[in-house]
Image: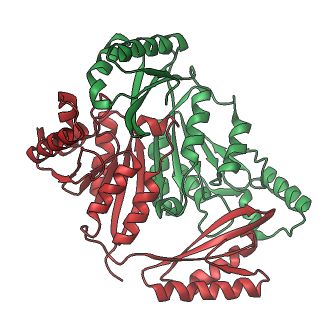
Chain colours: A red, B green
């Protein structure tokens, strides 16, 4: 087995904590990390308060190979991510010359006035590099093992695309799913046996209620596709032996 | 202003961290808490690993009036929430007689066999009380200031309904929204002025891109509806003075 690379995600934003906005960044960043061979180990959603952001950033960057943040990099008063990360790292905030140039080019192209508020998006913690933003003007920021991304999911998606293949990771985690209309409580023992027989896999059991019937999808994760498939095959056989029709790929 | 009551949420589940499942509990619990006069101050998503759950539970329950958890209370091997919370509190896990009776009644009613795995859902940290589950058999659990809920959103919804009005809270936070096709960067200074003039409010600015135009929704939160409305009225007037048509209620 290769070394395991880990990442955490800090979601910065009162709008998530107030229930106003449905987060979509956990799913998209988690799935992107899987492909990079990096595992998301923790997510924290914190409010727009510097001390809370500093605490989360410092704990999560120390415990993981990578820390991603989303949100709080716009031009308004509630956008304090850059200042908080600079405070966490103990460095000043500076104007990034390349970001200044990018923003000037962008605002000239779209034909709007260059204001102080707009140029505030070129502020970065000293020592930071930029992450290109193919959608709107303001770039993301990389400093040490921290990747500062936008909060708006489609802008984050563009930034992730630019980072694809650039972060050192391990083997991508492969997952194979099999489903059955088997109530979780009837297959708990069977699952334990399959787990024992396949120690290099992790099996998740996700119950559902569909078309009037209870069932579960079983997701087998492993670093090796053959190892995952062997486990799924074994699980499928045991499900059928117990009287449940298996549905490869899940229900 | 009344005392501010706070809550945190610990989401327990590899399926969220792997990007397999889109979380829907943050929004529903946050919105429910708003109505109870309790503010959600932090969310953590942690994997199905006891030491990680224990750490999150102990930190979050100490820092907040209430801690909610979701996920990991089913009957399979990856459901370790009860054991982790008992470990965090330093108490043993016991069978709750009322939960045993509820599960027996439930499984008799739906006509399925009572197995050891099923009855494992009656396991609770010693000293816990039950939170009724109107949807399926397994109840939620309350112990000290911790509320252990299901992971499946509609089951969590049922448990929340049973808790409505039972938790001590402060004044519900009122929020009023006004939108405008005003790019965030053009109204950053205006927003700062409105904030200064209305110190008992919090203003969130949420940019969007719709029908080819940039704009923002401005959400004003306050404990008093009149205070929030006065701030929104002032903001709306200033937006119109700056040449942006305001849209009450948001865009």
Foreground: A152 or B58? A152
Which quarter of the figure is the N terminus of chain A placed in?
A: bottom left
Q: Is residue B30 left or right of residue A124?
A: right
Q: Is residue B218 visible?
A: yes
In the image, B52 versus B195, the foreground residue is: B195
Q: Is residue A230 left or right of residue A242?
A: left
Kindly identify the residue that appears in the image at 61 percent across and 63 percent down: B79
| Residue at position x 68%, y 54% in the image | B124
Residue shown at the point (58%, 25%) measured from the top left: B37
* Rendering coords of residue A151 (x, y %): 37, 45
Q: Is residue A123 left or right of residue B169?
A: left
Check the image and report above or below for A90 versus B222.
below
Picture coordinates of residue B73 (x, y %)? 65, 58
Which quarter shows the C terminus of chain A?
A: bottom right
Task: State whether residue A179 is above or below residue B201.
Answer: below
Q: Position of residue B205 (x, y in %)?
A: 38, 30
Examine the image and state in which quarter residue B31 appears: top right
**Percent x, y for residue B233?**
45, 12
Q: Which residue occupies 40% across, 24% down?
A: B203
């Amino acid at each position: 087995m290769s070394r395991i690379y880990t990442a955490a995600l800090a979601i910065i934003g009162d709008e998530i904590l107030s229930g106003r906005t449905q987060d979509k960044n956990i799913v998209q960043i988690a799935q992107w990390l899987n492909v990079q061979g990096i595992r998301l180990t923790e997510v924290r959603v914190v409010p727009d308060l510097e001390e809370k952001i500093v605490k989360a950033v410092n704990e999560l960057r120390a415990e993981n190979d990578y820390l991603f943040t989303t949100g709080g990099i716009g031009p308004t008063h509630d956008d304090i991510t850059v200042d908080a990360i600079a405070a966490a790292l103990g460095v000043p905030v500076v104007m990034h010359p390349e970001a200044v140039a990018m923003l000037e080019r962008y605002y000239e192209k779209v034909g709007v006035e260059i204001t102080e508020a707009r140029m505030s998006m070129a502020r970065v913690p000293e020592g930071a590099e930029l992450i290109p933003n193919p959608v709107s003007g303001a770039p993301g920021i990389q400093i040490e093992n921290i990747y500062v991304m936008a909060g708006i999911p489609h802008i984050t998606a563009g930034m992730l695309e630019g980072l694809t293949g650039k972060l050192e990771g391990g083997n991508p985690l492969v997952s194979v799913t099999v489903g059955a209309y088997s109530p979780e409580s009837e297959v708990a023992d069977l699952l334990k046996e399959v787990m024992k027989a396949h120690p290099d896999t992790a099996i998740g059991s996700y119950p559902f209620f569909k078309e009037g019937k209870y069932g579960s999808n079983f997701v087998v994760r492993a670093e090796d596709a053959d190892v995952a498939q062997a486990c799924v095959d074994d699980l499928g056989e045991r499900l059928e032996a117990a009287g449940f029709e298996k549905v490869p790929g899940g229900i």
